[in-house]
Image: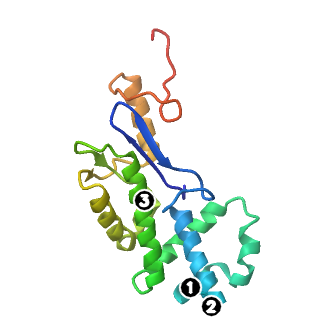
Amino acid sequence: GTGLIAVGTDLTRWRRADGWGHLLGDCGGGAWIGRAGLEAALRAHDGRDGGSAPLLACAEEQFGPVRGLPGRLYPRTDRPALLASFAPQVAACAPRDPVAAGILRAAARNIAESAAAVCPASGTPEMAFTGGLLKMGDPLLVPLREELAARLPHARQVPAEGDPLHGCVRIANELAARGLTLPGEPSMLYVVPTKGD
């Protein structure tokens, strides 16, 4: 949860992009958006460039006075979830706040970069997206569609057939029934041999 990872295959090998956690990556994910929104709020509090008064108001409504935010945030073990909890506020502010809209455009750019890194370069690959970020609606989805069209004009976006857990169960069931052939990759897909294999 809250992170961002892209996984792709051309049915001969797997590719992965990002998924490095909220400190080193997950660029464009929920925690990334929330952190960027809180940074803009703190910039507004300080009077620095790049600040957002609407995001400052939202941050203080959600977390209390921002002066105490670092002391409440840094010691927590659920930091990514706490940061991600602010991402919907960024989306809510985006229609009237250019700073919030810019954060979501940057998130869309990062998501599209990760998708492009794992997408086969030829043919007509299909791509599906899943996760809570999609609930943000047009403030994120419009720039994401624009970025994807620019970076991956040969790919076709399809609806996800379920969430990641459903995908894992489906792949496991189809592999067990020998109805699916996917490339092996120890960190992405490892099938434990059974008796008779």
Tag 1 residue:
51
Crowding at label 2, few (<14), some or many (≥20) Cα neighbours within 10 Å? few
The x and y percentages for residue 149 are 27, 61
Examine the image and state in which quarter residue 157 appears.
bottom left
Crowding at label 1, few (<14), some or many (≥20) Cα neighbours within 10 Å? many
The x and y percentages for residue 133 are 45, 63
Q: Do the residues labelled 1 and 2 touch (CB within 8 Å)?
A: yes
Residue at 22 percent across and 45 percent down: it is 124
Location of residue 69 with respect to 132 vertically, above or below: below
Confirm whether residue 95 shows in the render.
Answer: yes
The answer for how far apart the CA atoms under marks 1 and 3 are is 23 Å
Tag 3 residue:
111
Confirm whether residue 92 shows in the render.
Answer: no
Q: What residue type is labelled 3?
A: Ile
Q: Quick one: SS at disc 1?
A: loop
Location of residue 8 with respect to 85 vertically, above or below: above
Q: What residue type is labelled 1?
A: Gly
